[in-house]
Amino acid sequence: MIFQLKILGNNSAIPAHDRNQTSQLLQLDSRYVLIDCGEGTQIQLSNQKIRLNRIKTVLISHLHGDHYFGLIGLISTMHLFHRKHKLTVFAPSELKEILALQLKASETSLCFELEFIPLNHDGLMEIHKEEQFTIQSFPLEHGIKCYGFLIKETPKQWRINKDKLPDDMLIQDIITLKKGESVFDENGSIKYALDKYTLPPRPSRTYAYCSDTMYNEDIITYVQNVDLLYHESTFADEMEERAALTHHSTATQAATIAKKAKVHKLLLGHYSTRYKDPTPLLDEAKKVFDETYLTHEGETFFLKE
Ligand SMILES: [Zn+2]
């Protein structure tokens, strides 16, 4: 399965320095999940030649405008393109009313189904499941209701070891082994032992998105061992006090979460406009966690199998 993340926007609060407000597109084979939808998102989607029909799911972390002001515009464009498929939006509950009012005021009756699933929970919760992946959400600490998201590839099947495969093995026995079970004969004796004929499944890939949040060690348990973690990093160390006051994080704090959660790779973003060049944020973060990368708009991060 293709599992890749495209950065559509990475500036905080306002568009600046040719950077748009937060938005990311996660591609899981032919399915696209849009994560946050700042004002410039649909222009970015168009620049990246993304087919809007493929976006089936939208995750909105919280209702600060720089994370969702682009959504009504995107929905409106989908309507003008005569979209037929349902679009499912997961967001804090107040967004339902906001969207309904915007559609009512413009006398728009959407030509597709807009499903709204409110986020209103504590702890880690599974909010969506498909054959190839699940989406879980968890609370962040940002002054207003705010959620992070964890997207996990569905556990894979065991792999048949072709070098050990007998010519006469039946299809149903192969299916049993792929499920991770040994095959027994009619007398209950072992016919094909799992460990002899198979190799363990390839690891399932995981992506965690931590939108706006102040430093909070609760996050560590939610994002433990993920392959790729995005954690906002609005400020450099010199602004640590301001980060706490505004419920944001420094790059060093993002790296500390990444290190303590033993993630494989950390992405920074949501840069304050004061940083035309966010390299100092990267330098500070790398002192704590070396596998840290800046995000740039249009850039794609691949999660390899
Ligand atoms: Zn915010």
Image: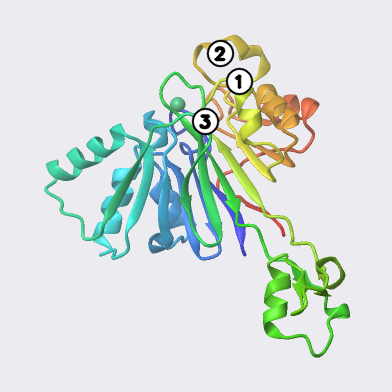
Whether label 2 touches label 1, CB < 8 Å: yes
Residues at marks 2 and 1, CA–CA distance in whole angstroms: 8 Å
Residue drawn at x 32%, y 59% is 86
Please give the residue where the numbered disc 1 appears in the rendered image.
215
Q: Is residue 268 visible?
A: no
- CB at disc 1 and ligand 1 closer than 8 Å: no
**Quarter of the image where one finds residue 272:** top right
Q: Earlier in the sequence, mark 3 or mark 1?
A: 3
- CB at disc 2 and ligand 1 closer than 8 Å: no
Q: Earlier in the sequence, mark 2 or mark 1?
A: 1
Please give the residue where the numbered disc 2 appears in the rendered image.
244
Q: Does 129 sit above or below residue 293?
A: below
Q: Amino acid at mark 1?
A: Tyr
Q: Which mark is residue 23?
A: none
Residue drawn at x 83%, y 79% is 162
Left-right relation of 140 to 115: right
Q: Does 35 sit above or below residue 79?
A: above
Q: Earlier in the sequence, mark 2 or mark 3?
A: 3
Whether label 2 touches label 3, CB < 8 Å: no
Residue drawn at x 53%, y 51% is 134
Q: Residues within 10 Å of mark 2 (few under 14, many from 20)?
A: some
| Residue 106 on image: x %, y % | 14, 45
Q: Quadrant of ligand 1?
A: top left
Please give the residue where the numbered disc 3 appears in the rendered image.
123
Q: Does 272 sit above or below residue 229?
A: above
Quarter of the rendering occupied by the C terminus = bottom right
Q: Secondary structure at mark 2?
A: helix
Nearest the eye: 58 or 10:
58
Quarter of the rendering occupied by the N terminus = bottom right
| Residue 181 on image: x %, y % | 73, 66
